[in-house]
Image (cartoon, rainbow, N blue to C red):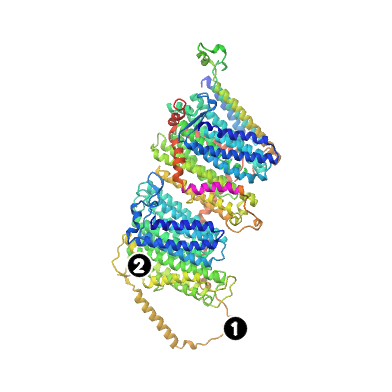
């Protein structure tokens, strides 16, 4: 089992470099698409295969052991993120087959997409801080390229802004890693955790924490580091928007942040307060900005900020509970983490679904401006069905998955005594609903404008891409008890072990 | 401030200069230069972490081996830390990729907008 | 499997089947909806009778049935588990739900025959029943919430079956969704602060002691009132009534939403919470304001369905007022009025559907003289209109009479005031329905603009007649009806009724419907005698003229709507009504305006300037460093 682990990085990385070599002919581009699709399936298969055991897995690259070697470490959280990523990636790839026909140089598109997947998977599985940074940059740089893929005014502008802000984020992450290295003399996360666990808080560590919170917060598009997201995510081709909003901001933002705060530095009260504040702020500001949008994809982009707020809020309050100043109630922290991670999984599903359906609408109707659409429910039933499922899920309407994760978060916040935050979470859920009611009214319902009378349903690959994710949204709610057992609670448990537990599991002395 | 901290402080000054360029300059090229300066500042910071006053290059020669064939403690105590140097090599390569990307984008932006003035490249807002 | 499980499973599965078939075989979906509700009725009846025969419900009580106790989510302080319990109050709601489900499914098979979305309508109807059963039977607050939100969603989807309904649907979901999430907040608060026993409904009693609990109660109250359509959260209802098919209005805003809203109001106010006295006063005042404000708005309406929508709001006031009194007779009146209102109001909406089908419009100004074309509809309209206006001996009078008694029993200054408002509201209702009856059915017949111009088919007539009959039965035999349907629920809520007539024989007055019917019939007979004897037949008829000038061959047409133009010209009230029509008292509109300001300010900040964005990020970093160091 351990030996297939490097494949989650190696396969897409290889495919990424192979695709451009296949040539620019139609044949070459179809081959590249096929290759990417194959890798997508293989990726999902590997992620599922990792669930055959619940044991933590460690793979040492090149069989060099610590402290020199670089490790790949798998625990519950890694498994959750890998599964989410590969699921969304597969849906996006299936969708791309038909959607990307209108672009040229699709070989390069698949190449960049594969590099992004490799980078994300690398961030998720790596057990080494500097390696995390490298994979983060691989994913980021390929995403800059993908955002600019349309090479029109908006795409280039968005990509440039994203690039500048993204670079600043990466910069501070690297600085933070440097500080931690200076403190501990280690780069392996388990060893760093082990070394930090012994000492109390100090200025250098605090500074590193601030840099990480800012850097990863920027990657996760938390307010006030969010300004790039509403430009970048809508400008990319729809399947890429789905990947960026669905998984990239989670893998390179929330995942990395949670991993470092919980498992490397150990949750302190100050980290927790900052996370909570960032989460609450993002939640509220994001949703207000989203409500005012009339561009479907931009609206979705702002909702990503808002929904990331939920996740970070839940994780932040969990950190508060677990911090030395908190009550230390493991069950409550576990519930909060379960809610946050469930929402992370759900958001990946429904936001990707919404972006894919926006792409389908844009492709078929020629516009993504809400005011120019209407009555699409009758013209494009499958797309409309999927769009509706996504909209109701993100709005937290039962029986879809979003309802259950928001329910858990609100109840858990109340249990933690955070009444105000619970009320805020509920209010934001409502605002999300309001904004998606507008989307449904203007896009799905009402009269069809004359100009769109001839609009037809999207081709089958696009439909299947959407239906994969719609199924997840539909079943995620009723099957929550089952999902929780094998997927979410183990993921929450790996954050609950804190730094000491992580060190014990994965440091070379304690581990394999 | 001890004398050992001065280089660190200087690298931070370089960093601030870069950030200043990014915030205050409207010209796309100057913003790119700002990013590059911050990049160098961080690389400088990293390599300083491994610096040891009067240290030697972390290259093991025959003379550094002790009787059992391992590296002698004398070498370990005098050589600079090799890890940050390895790190910045990677970091420089990444920086290069980012720089190439930025320049390419800047050229395409100029094609489309006909300007390098970032205050006029703002179709996306609200 | 027991009766309750099956009753829940049938609409769920049937809805799924109907939804799958809705595109390919919409007629089949409609039939499935009808058969599904009929089948569900069998099991609901079993649950009801299981009340008398506990053997039927044994698996539920002891808990081995798989659906009886099935934890979905463990939430530390309790869990979201599917646990259901038949209560008398809940059974009353469930019986009403399934009855109206059958009626509307039957009606819509014909009424929506040519509607492109009748298949979806069938599916959503069944799912509505499913959600309502969950609310009525669940013994877990979160399951109640789940069912509650499913019904809200179904209302949204049902209203959206009409392309014109999308705006009304959005507004309804906007208001109802807001109160739905408020419910979630209230539940979380109660459970987290240990005021309830986990999420259990039956084992919890909450004493209103702290402001937090009071807020939680008001959140529950808001959800109940919004669903039922009481002031000030009623503003979604009239637009929905106007722009959705009549069958939808008859199903949700007219009947099921009332059953659900008042059920929750009663459950929460009389069972779950132990209220402070001032809360009762608040409830009664809300009731009184609802009665008066909505009926005044109804008087100036020009659209039949929108007018009915305002009455659907106004009548909720009586229920809230009755339950707010907290006295046995008031609560009895409130619950009885809930049932009666569901009957006559859905009957009225069915009438509106029939009129609209015939004439192609529901605008009062364009209707007239339909008594000849639609005699049966006219009959049903008469009965239901008199019933809603509280004309004895119909059911609307019986329940209003109880509410009046409850209001008087409050005593002090407030009691007589509430009584006056209630009676006045009833009089205005009658006035408004005189206008409706005149505009639609009396006067010279007008040429229908569009529509089928055919008499009502049997499929539509049958449910209308059945409902009208029930309006009479529940009025004339009010005592026995209360004994069978309402009294058990009342006893369960802890109110004993001494009188065998179930409260109709009270110290402040006596109402014997049967005796009254005899007197009324005598009066009518006397009137007819006078009419035939008094020589009125020999009245002289002339062509209409004005100022000596004769009109042409066709007599002029006066729409009944003109009767009430005067109201709009009254000095103070006229202004209020005008503002009301413009949405000046609509919380939805004000929230939208306020939100718009915040949104505008935030959007202006995102000016697209990269330097600005970078400086936010760096400022954020500076704040982070400060926050962490300090």
* Identity of the residue drawn at 57% across and 60% down: C163
Instruction: Classify mark 1: helix, strand or loop.
Output: strand
Q: Is residue C577 visible?
A: yes
**Mark 1 vs 2, N-terminal side:** 2
Above or below residue A157? Residue A198 is above
> How far apart, in angstroms, are the residues tagged by discs 1 and 2?
57 Å
* Identity of the residue drawn at 55% across and 26% down: A62
Residue A473 located within the stretch drawn in magenta:
yes
| Chain at tag 2 | C
Q: Which of C117 and B116 is in front in this view?
A: C117
Dot 1 and dot 2 residues touching (CB under 8 Å): no
Q: What stretch is highlighted in magenta?
A: A462-478
C32 sits left or right of A145 in the view: left
Q: Residues within 10 Å of mark 2 (few under 14, many from 20)?
A: many
Q: Report x, y in % for residue A401.
A: 49, 47
Above or below residue B19? Residue B71 is above
Residue A479 located within the stretch drawn in magenta:
no
């Amino acid at each position: 089992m351990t030996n297939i682990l490097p494949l989650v990085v190696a396969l897409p990385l290889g495919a990424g470099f192979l695709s451009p070599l296949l040539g620019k002919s139609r044949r070459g581009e179809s081959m590249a698409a096929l290759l990417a699709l194959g890798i997508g399936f293989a990726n999902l298969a590997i992620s599922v295969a990792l669930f055959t055991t619940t044991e933590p897995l460690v793979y040492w690259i090149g069989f060099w052991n610590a402290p020199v070697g670089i490790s790949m470490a798998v625990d519950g959280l890694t498994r959750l993120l890998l599964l989410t990523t590969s699921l969304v990636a597969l849906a996006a790839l299936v969708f791309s087959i038909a959607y990307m026909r209108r672009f040229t140089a699709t070989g390069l598109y698949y190449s960049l997409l594969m590099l992004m997947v490799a980078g994300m998977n690398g961030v998720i599985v790596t057990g080494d801080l500097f390696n995390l940074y490298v994979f983060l940059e691989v994913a980021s740089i390929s995403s800059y390229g993908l955002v600019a893929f349309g090479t029109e005014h908006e795409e280039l502008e968005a990509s440039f802004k994203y690039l500048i802000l993204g670079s600043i984020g990466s910069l501070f992450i690297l600085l933070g890693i440097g500080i931690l290295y200076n403190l501990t003399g280690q780069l392996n996360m388990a060893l760093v955790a082990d070394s930090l666990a012994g000492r109390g808080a100090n200025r250098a560590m605090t500074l590193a924490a601030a840099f990480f919170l800012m850097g990863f917060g920027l990657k996760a598009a938390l307010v006030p580091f969010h300004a790039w997201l509403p430009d970048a995510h809508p400008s990319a081709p729809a399947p890429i928007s789905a990947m960026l909003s669905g998984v990239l901001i989670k893998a390179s933002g929330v995942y990395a942040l949670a991993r470092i705060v919980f498992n490397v530095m150990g949750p302190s009260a100050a980290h927790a307060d900052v996370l909570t504040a960032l989460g609450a702020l993002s939640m509220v500001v994001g949703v207000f900005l989203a409500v005012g949008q009339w561009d479907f994809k931009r609206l979705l982009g702002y909702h990503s900020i808002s929904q990331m707020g939920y996740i970070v809020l839940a994780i932040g309050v969990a950190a508060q509970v677990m911090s030395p100043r908190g009550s230390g109630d493991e069950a409550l922290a576990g519930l909060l983490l379960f809610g946050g991670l469930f929402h992370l999984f759900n958001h990946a599903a429904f936001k990707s679904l919404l972006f894919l359906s926006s792409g389908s609408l844009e492709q078929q109707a020629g516009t993504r401006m809400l005011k120019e659409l209407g009555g699409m429910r009758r013209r494009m039933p499958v797309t409309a069905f999927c769009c509706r499922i996504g909209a109701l899920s993100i709005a937290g309407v039962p029986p879809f998955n979003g309802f259950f994760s928001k329910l858990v978060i609100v109840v858990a916040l109340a249990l933690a005594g955070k009444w105000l935050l619970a009320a805020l979470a509920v209010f934001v859920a409502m605002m999300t609903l309001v904004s998606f009611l507008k989307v449904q009214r203007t896009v799905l319902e009402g009269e069809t404008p004359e100009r769109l009378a001839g609009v037809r349903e999207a081709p089958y690959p696009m439909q299947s891409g959407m239906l994969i994710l719609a199924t997840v949204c539909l079943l995620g709610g009723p099957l929550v008890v089952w999902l929780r057992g094998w997927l979410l609670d183990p993921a929450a448990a790996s954050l609950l072990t804190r730094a000491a537990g992580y060190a014990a599991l994965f440091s070379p002395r304690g581990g394999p | 401030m001890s004398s050992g901290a001065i280089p660190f402080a200087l690298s931070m000054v370089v960093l601030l200069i870069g950030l200043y360029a990014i915030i205050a300059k409207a010209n796309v090229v100057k913003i790119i230069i700002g990013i590059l300066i911050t990049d160098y500042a961080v690389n400088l910071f990293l390599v300083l972490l491994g610096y040891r006053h009067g240290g030697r290059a972390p290259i093991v020669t025959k003379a550094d081996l002790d009787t059992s064939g391992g590296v002698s403690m004398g070498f370990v105590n005098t050589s600079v830390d090799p890890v940050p140097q390895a790190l910045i090599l990677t970091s420089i390569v990444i920086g290069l990729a980012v720089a190439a990307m930025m320049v390419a984008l800047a050229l395409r932006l100029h094609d489309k907008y006909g300007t390098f003035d970032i205050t006029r490249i703002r179709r996306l807002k609200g | 499997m027991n009766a309750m499980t099956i009753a829940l499973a049938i609409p769920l599965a049937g809805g799924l089947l109907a939804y799958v078939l809705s595109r390919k075989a919409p007629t089949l979906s409609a039939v499935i909806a009808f058969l599904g509700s009929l089948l569900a009725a069998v099991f609901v009846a079993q649950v009801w009778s299981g009340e008398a025969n506990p053997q039927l419900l044994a698996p539920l009580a002891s808990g081995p049935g798989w659906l009886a106790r099935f934890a979905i989510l463990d939430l530390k302080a309790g869990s979201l588990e599917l646990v259901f319990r038949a209560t008398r109050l809940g059974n009353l709601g469930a019986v009403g739900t399934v009855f109206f489900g059958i009626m509307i499914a039957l009606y819509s098979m014909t009424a929506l025959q040519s509607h492109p979305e009748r298949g979806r309508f069938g599916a959503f109807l069944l799912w509505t029943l499913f959600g309502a059963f969950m609310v009525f039977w669940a013994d877990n607050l979160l399951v109640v919430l789940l069912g509650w939100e499913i019904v809200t969603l179904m209302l949204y989807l049902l209203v959206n079956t009409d392309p014109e309904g999308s705006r009304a649907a959005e507004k309804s979901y906007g208001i109802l969704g807001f109160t739905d999430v408020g419910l979630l907040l209230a539940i979380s608060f109660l459970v987290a602060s240990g005021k309830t026993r986990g999420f259990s409904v039956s084992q919890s009693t909450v004493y209103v002691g702290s402001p937090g609990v009071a807020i939680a109660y008001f959140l529950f109250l808001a959800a109940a009132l919004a669903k039922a359509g009481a002031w000030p959260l009623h503003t979604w209802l009239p637009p929905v009534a106007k722009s959705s098919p009549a069958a939808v209005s008859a199903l949700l805003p007219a009947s099921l939403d009332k059953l659900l809203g008042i059920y929750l109001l009663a459950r929460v106010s009389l069972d779950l919470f132990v209220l402070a006295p001032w809360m009762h006063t608040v409830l009664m005042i809300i009731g009184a304001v609802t009665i008066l404000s909505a009926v005044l708005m109804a008087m100036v309406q020009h659209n039949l369905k929108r007018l009915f929508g305002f009455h659907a709001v106004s009548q909720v006031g009586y229920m809230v007022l009755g339950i707010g009194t907290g006295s046995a007779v008031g609560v009895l009146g409130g619950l009885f009025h809930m049932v009666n209102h569901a009957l006559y109001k859905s009957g009225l909406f069915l009438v509106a559907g029939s009129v609209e089908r015939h004439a192609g419009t529901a605008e009062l100004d364009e209707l007239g003289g339909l008594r000849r074309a639609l005699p049966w509809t006219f009959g049903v309209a008469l009965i239901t209109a008199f019933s809603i206006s509280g004309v004895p001996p119909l059911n609307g009078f019986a329940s209003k009479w109880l509410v009046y008694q409850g209001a008087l029993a409050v005593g002090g200054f407030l009691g007589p005031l509430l009584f006056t408002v209630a009676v006045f509201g009833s009089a205005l209702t009658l006035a408004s329905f005189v206008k409706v009856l005149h505009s639609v059915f009396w006067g010279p017949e007008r040429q229908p603009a569009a529509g089928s111009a055919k008499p009502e088919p049997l499929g539509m007539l049958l449910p209308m007649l059945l409902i009208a009959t029930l309006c009479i039965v529940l009025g004339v035999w009010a005592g026995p009806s209360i004994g069978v349907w309402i009294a058990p629920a009342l006893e369960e809520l802890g109110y004993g009724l001494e009188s065998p007539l179930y409260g109709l024989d009270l110290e402040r007055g006596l109402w014997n419907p049967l005796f009254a019917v005899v007197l009324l019939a005598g009066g009518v007979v006397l009137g007819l005698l006078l009419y035939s004897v008094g020589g009125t037949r020999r009245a002289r008829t002339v062509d209409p003229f004005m100022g000596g000038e004769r009109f042409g061959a066709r007599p002029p047409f006066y729409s009944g709507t003109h009767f009430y133009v005067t109201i709009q010209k009254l000095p103070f009230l006229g202004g209020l009504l005008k503002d009301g029509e413009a949405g000046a008292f609509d919380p939805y509109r004000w929230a939208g305006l306020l939100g718009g300001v915040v949104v505008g300010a935030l959007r202006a900040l995102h000016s697209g300037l990269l330097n600005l964005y970078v400086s936010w990020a760096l400022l954020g970093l500076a704040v982070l460093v400060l926050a962490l160091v300090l």
